[in-house]
Amino acid sequence: MKAYLWFVLFFILLLVFEFLKLYFIMPFPGSQTSEMVWLSYPIHVYRWVFRSLIGLGFLLAMWRCFKISTLGKVISFLGAMFVCLVYYGVGYVFSAEAMFKQLERLSYVDAKAYESSRIIIGINRNDEAKAYPIEMLGYHHYILDSLANQPYLLSYCTVCHSGRVYSPVVDGKLLRFRLVGMDLFNAMLEDNETGSWWRQASGECIAGPFKGRKLTELPFVQCSVAEWVKLFPGSYFLKEDSRYKDEYRSIDGFAVGEVKGGLIGVDTTGIWSDKAWIIGVEFNGISKAYLWNDVVKRGPLVDSIGNSVIEIYANEESHDFFVKDYLTDSTMLSFQEFWHSWKAFHPNTLRKIDY
């Protein structure tokens, strides 16, 4: 009987550990409401130490059960099979990088391959330009590419509705990434060089050897294909990979607010709800948010942030937007994303309510 109790104990420990490994970095109920990286990161880093210790205890208990009786042999066999299924599920089926596969190689087409209303994120450097459909970015979560011999990490999190472009070079080294999970409902990337974890929405490293460092943000444009072609008629467009066609189609209309409900649904009622679109801007340590619907209806708006006067613009049809210094006409970094995401990573942000 004691052998069976040890078998059950280690079996439960194994299940609990594997569940916790997933729970804190995936969108389970309650798992993303507070910062748990302090716990999820060591679980991830030392996962094989924990697995080895628990697995060794489980194997010893299984062997003792196996020697007791025919029933013990059956229980041992079924337990071993179930454990293998758990390891396979956690390691390959339900891992973030297995669920959202990456492009093996990048190829490009011209603007004719896409509808003119398709929303893209565009990059231009030294008169060269590339554009990336948001539905593609939303599935893959990130793409490492280059333009004019300058590498950049282009990322998109559908749960935050946040697009970002960063320089992937840290201390002179080009970092390569993998999708590891989520933190506060935001996609989290792990660099292959040090195993550090980076937030998609802020470019901040929150765990690992690079903790406290930030990736340098790079400018980009979010707009329709038609609007982008006006700006850069010779631009290249990332070509869809036919293997992921169904995945791209599953979020059709997401970029223009047609998807409702669930983790990625948009609230278009025009109130400050968690899933409402906002335009966020940060300048000299001050951050401010503007409700997308207000800017579309009332814009262009003139406002102040700190000692600077700014202009905020958004177009409902082309979905392009910008924030400019009103006096110099220079474009400032600004982002369209869900209100819950912006306030999570800009806790002291101001809200523009009165007009």
Image (tube, helix red, strand yellow):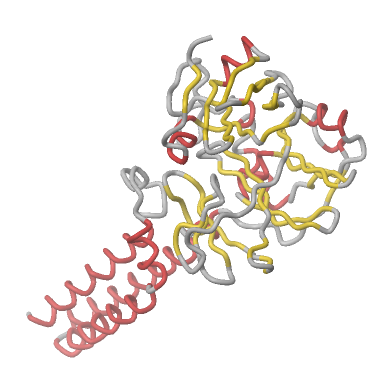
Q: Where is residue 342 in the image (x, y as percent from the top left)?
A: 49, 35
Which quadrant is home to the C terminus?
top right
Q: From what the image shows, is residue 314 above or below residue 337? A: above
Residue 324 horizontal side relative to residue 81, left or right = right
Instruction: Identify whether 195 is placed above or below 343.
Output: below
Farthest residue, direction bottom: 67
Instruction: Classify residue 332 by image quadrant.
Output: top right
Q: Which residue is drawn at 38% across and 57% down?
A: 37
Name the residue furthest right. Answer: 234
Percent coordinates x, y for residue 14 in the rendering: 28, 70
Q: Which residue lies furthest to the front in this view?
A: 307
The vertical placement of 353 against 163, above or below, is above
Note whether 2 is above or below 124 in the view shown: below
Q: Which quarter of the figure has residue 55?
A: bottom left
Apparent side of residue 115 relative to residue 161 in the rendered image (left or right) = right
User: Measured from the top left, where is residue 118 in percent x and y?
Assistant: 74, 31
In front of the other: 150 or 114: 150
Residue 57 image point, x, y percent: 23, 82
- Quadrant housing the N terminus: bottom left
- Residue drawn at (65%, 13%) of the image: 299
